[in-house]
Amino acid sequence: MNLANHISYLLKFHECVVIPEFGAFISNYRSAHFDGIRNVFTPPGKEVIFNSKINKNDGLLINYIVDVEKITYHQAQLSVLNFVDHLNATLNNGDQIDLETIGTLVFDKNGVIIFTAYSNFEDTASYGLTEFKYPTLKESKQITSFQQRPAIRAIHGHKDLLKIAASIALLLALSLYPIRNHNVHLKSSVLNTSDLLNTKLPVKSKSLVEESTSASISNDKISPYLLVGGSFNVYKNASQMQNELVKEGYASEIIEMETGLYRVIIDSYSNKNEAANAKITYRMNHKNSGAWVSIR
């Protein structure tokens, strides 16, 4: 019985496969990206991490072994326990564990399990895409030419000054000439300047102001960017991880996905940069973590 092959198969269809009393392999979706060093576009795939803290039996691996190997649940459970004993003995001897198609496991100097995933596990062919290169784009230089325009002619001639003076005199004469109308008599204004100063401008209604304020407050409270710690088939396992996060001071929550999985949210953030920085900090403090940023 090759348990490594069973685990590898389950990881293609499940985000988390738990080896009871040992740890869990978690597969995260990796979107397509551009490798600037190699000048290559890589397709989407999966990356796998290992977390030794998630070791409670959720039944996924054992039930799959029962179905494939056509054995009883007790026999499958004993096979997994023997496999775990073999893994622990190999690690305690200082040797490296080679899990076919998945990766390698080994102890570091502090006795922490270090997992290195094989690159071929990503199985990019399942997405129908392969890596491809694109020729480097070169920026074309544009030369902009400017055409000179004739300057505005300055008014400094003697004849021009005479025309301007005559025009000003005509305007003054027309302004002093009284305008008469047999039917209309001009009256002085009865508008008091104090009344004008005391006139109040129309104000937006209170209900609209309160409504817009409450809407803005509700929008500010939403934190759309989520730092995800993992997904589980069993709610108990998700709750266990959430309790550990709460003890560390995170505002953790559990979201039930449409697929029936329980996604553990480490914390939520108002902008993308803040969530990205939090992911880096969390991974530094949790070496085996594969936390990723998602949108609510």
Image (cartoon, rainbow, N blue to C red):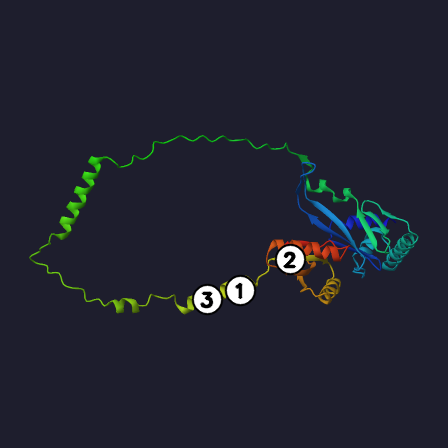
For the residue pair 245 and 237, the one nearer the viewer reads as: 245
Mark seen at residue 211: 3
Classify residue 99 as left or right of residue 183: right
Residue 296 placement (x, y as % from top left): 61, 57
- Disc 1: CA contacts within 10 A as few (<14), some (14-19) or many (>=20): few
Classify residue 176 as left or right of residue 15: left
Residue 125 placement (x, y as % from top left): 72, 40
Disc 1/disc 3 C-alpha distance (Å): 11 Å
**Can residue 2 be seen here?**
yes
Q: What residue type is labelled 3?
A: Glu
Is label 1 in a helix, a strand or a loop? Answer: helix
Is label 2 in a helix, a strand or a loop? Answer: strand
Identify which residue is drawn at 63% across, 60% down: 268
Disc 2/disc 1 C-alpha distance (Å): 18 Å
Residue 94 placement (x, y as % from top left): 91, 51
Identify which residue is drawn at 41% across, 69% down: 206
Residue 78 placement (x, y as % from top left): 89, 58
Going from the N terminus, do you reach mark 2 or mark 1 first? 1
- Disc 3: CA contacts within 10 A as few (<14), some (14-19) or many (>=20): few
- The residue at which mark 1 appears reads as 218
Q: Which amino acid does label 1 sit on?
A: Ser
For the residue pair 268 and 274, the one nearer the viewer reads as: 274
Q: What residue type is labelled 2?
A: Leu
| Vertical placement of residue 73 versus 10, above or below | below
Is label 3 in a helix, a strand or a loop? Answer: helix
- The residue at which mark 2 appears reads as 226
